[in-house]
Amino acid sequence: MTTSQNRSHSMLILLGIALLAYALAGNYVALPGYIRFLERGGTSQAGNTFDMAVLIGAAKTIVWMFSFQLGILCLAAAHAMRHGLYTRHLVLAITLWLIVWAWPSLPAPGAWFYVGFGGALLAVISMLLAQKPVSPSTRLSRTLFLGAVVFFALATWEICGLGSTGRMLHPEQAAEPLAHNLLVTQSSKLMIELVIAWSLLLASARTKEKTA
């Protein structure tokens, strides 16, 4: 890599690590303030619907909400850049998914969604296990493999979020009303991420098999 590329690679790694650290720290830096904001009916401590405190709190919360995904994206881009993969294509594909993921609420898709995507998962996993084990070798196969790792990471984080949304970490709150649509949205995104991850892994294996 050139000097400029080395500098970009180092900056991406540092930014990725910082964002992942904030994904954890945000539980203490951003989340408490956001909860207080909601408890006050969407106003600041001074009683205003919009002031500097609301602006700062909103910025901390929004960055926290995307910190894990953006951190993973930075680290994946740094890895792709270092190993000469299709960095731009990878970043574009993940960015497009994050735009879709950012949609706060999705309509309940119905049983067909979970049956269809669940069936797709079983089919893709079965096809993958039927492949001959081969290490990533081509530029395309390694890019697809990295993409699969990224989506597995996003799905893992989604599972952690379901634990919080489902009150599993705070059983004392189980009696409180729970927005069903929030669970539907999060579980739908999780299902899609898993299908994408396993599909990319299968595509990587198929690519390796054709070029082996």
Image: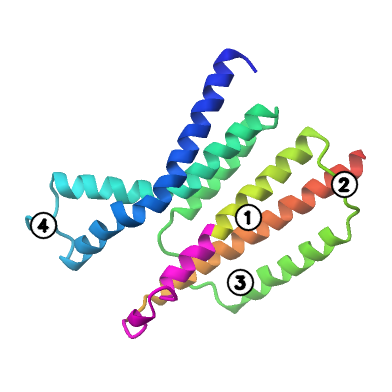
Disc 4 versus disc 1: distance between alpha carbons?
A: 40 Å
Mark 3 or mark 1: whose residue is earlier in sequence: 3
The residue beneath circle 4 is 45
Q: Mark 2 points at which residue?
A: 134
Note whether 60 is above or below 170 in the view shown: above
What's the CA distance linking mark 4 and mark 3? 43 Å
How crowded is the residue under tag 1: few (<14 C-alpha within 10 Å), some, or many (20+)?
A: some
Describe the element under mark 3 as helix, strand or loop: helix
Horizontal and vertical percent position of residue 127: 84, 61
Is 166 covered by the magenta stretch?
yes
Mainly helix, strand or loop, the magenta region? helix
Q: Which amino acid does label 3 sit on?
A: Phe
Query: Is residue 120 toward the left or the right of residue 56 in the image?
Result: right
Which of the two discs, 2 and 3, labels the residue nearer the N terminus? 3
Q: Are marks 3 and 1 in contact (CB under 8 Å)?
A: no
Find the residue positioned furthest to the left.
46
* Labels 4 and 1: the sequence-earlier one: 4
- Mark 2 and mark 3 in contact? Answer it, CB < 8 Å: no
Query: Which label's residue is closer to the chain start, 4 or 2?
Result: 4
Q: How far separated are the C-alphas under marks 2 and 3?
A: 32 Å
Element at badge 1? helix
Numbered tag placed on residue 152 in the rendering: 1
Quarter of the figure that contains the C terminus? top right
Quote the CA–CA distance across marks 3 and 1: 20 Å
Q: Which residue lies under the disc numbered 3?
A: 113
Q: Are marks 2 and 1 in contact (CB under 8 Å)?
A: no
Q: Give the range drawn in magenta.
A: 157-176
Amino acid found under the numbered disc labelled 2: Val
- Could you tell me which secondary element the residue under label 2 belongs to? loop
